Image (cartoon, rainbow, N blue to C red):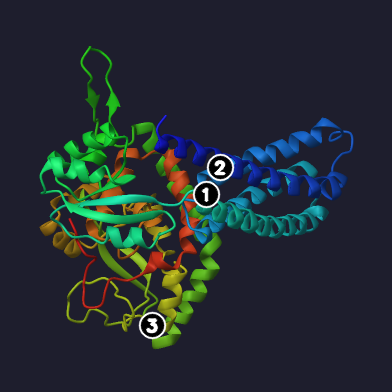
Amino acid sequence: MNSNTNVETKKKVFRFISSVVLVVTLATLFGVMWYLRLQNLMNANRFEGKGNYVMIALYMVLSLLVINTFNGFEFGSARISILTMSQAIAVGVVNAMEYVIVILMIRILKHLWRTLGYFAALTLAEAVAVLVITYISTKLYRRLFPPFSILNIYGDYENDLVTKMNRRDDKYSIDGEISCREPHEKIVEELEKYDAVLINDVPSEIRNDIVKACFAADKRVYFTPKIADILIKGSEEVNLFDTPLYLCKNVGMDGVSAAIKRMGDILISSIGIIITSPIMLVTAILIHMYDGGPALYKQVRCTIGGKEYKIMKFRSMITDAEKDGKARLASENDDRITPIGHFIRATRIDELPQFFNILKGDMSIVGPRPERPEIIAEYIKEVPEFAFRTHVKAGLTGYAQVYGKYNTTSYDKLKLDMIYCEKCSVLLDIQLILMTLRVIFTKDATEGVAEGETTAKVHK
């Protein structure tokens, strides 16, 4: 067993132990509340003895599933703030589910608010526990497992990936670089000096040789995928012959899954409209009172197959934001955004009217974000594959919204959206919907493009 394999084994053991500590702590806090408060509200005969253990075990299973859905067990990988937020939201979801279960079991309305108070107190206590456990585990992880020394093998295109990775100096240490155009023998000799290799926007034929060399030398490899890599990743094995064969179906969801997805869109958008209608009413009044302009605005966007439709959003900019007729994204410190606009954009309230687009069928809850035809045309000039995003219906949230930012380059957005196109399923949609709750509280997810630019950078 080489040193890298040994380190990876230790990391997995550490994450497993940290995850067990987290889940057991949450279940223990729930158990304390159950025995001290909730058990007394139940039918004593029904919940004597082992019945109590069943409820605690149920809570533990739900915690495990929901926290995993929110990627809440990535100790040492994610930032403490992001990881804690994911875990806290997951805990809130679990407690909401348990609250509904308990209320259905009690079936006495007079205990409704008292039980809600118990769960609110539990959620607060668990939030503190989550913060303490995550902080200690992350700090200990970083001390036990210092970052690997990485060689950056760069290609012909410039990007800011190295800058992004350097911001996570707790995880990555890029200590050297070499051009992919150097002789292969020189690259192989250089990579022997490092723990890992970053293959950064390198042509496929050169990258393949480097990957083989890294495999032979037992070096871990980070690489930026091409569009073809993402398409191939969704392929299936065909084991009918003695020659390895892979199949890329490229058909998206099957008919049954698509029907379930549409029913889910109708249900969620209807509930969304009902629940958020007070917020939408107040927002509309405030926007109109600010400058006398319309509260809503409609804009042409593209959905599946390039079909155009009019998206509805709350107006966050001045009424003549594009009086020159030129389409452009919001930039950092954009003076076209009104004070109310800054708030509704940061809180995503400006997106709420899109529930009506979803109910109508123009959009889905999950899918690539719809772009304006003019901006799509601009992107396609540099990245022709950008049109691939319209192979599925546009969505309110999606892969690029959860894992990207407003100013993520068009090529990276395309890659994220193509990952969704290849992996799309009802279960993935549910996970992305839940993950969106975390994104709402992430400030940099709404960063604008740089001043003076009309679209996000391409960087192919």
Q: Examine the rendered structure and indicate whether residue 294 appears above or below residue 219.
A: below
What residue sits right under mark 1 in the picture? 144
Give the residue drawn at x 39%, y 38%.
Answer: 425
Q: Can you give x and y, in whole percent of width and height, for residue 21 in the image?
A: 65, 44
User: Secondary structure under badge 2?
Assistant: helix
Question: Of the residues under marks 2 and 3, which one precedes in the sequence?
Answer: 2
**Of 149 and 441, the residue lying toward us:** 149
Instruction: Tell me if residue 66 can be seen.
Output: yes
Q: Amino acid at mark 1?
A: Leu
Q: Amino acid at mark 3?
A: Thr
Q: Are marks 1 and 2 in contact (CB under 8 Å)?
A: yes
What residue sits right under mark 3 in the picture? 338
Q: Amino acid at mark 2?
A: Phe
Which-is-in-front pick, marks 2 and 3?
2
Mark pair 1, 3: CA separation? 48 Å
Which-is-in-front pick, marks 1 and 3?
1
Residue 250 in which image quadrant: top left
Q: Which of the numbered marks, if any, corresponds to residue 14? A: 2
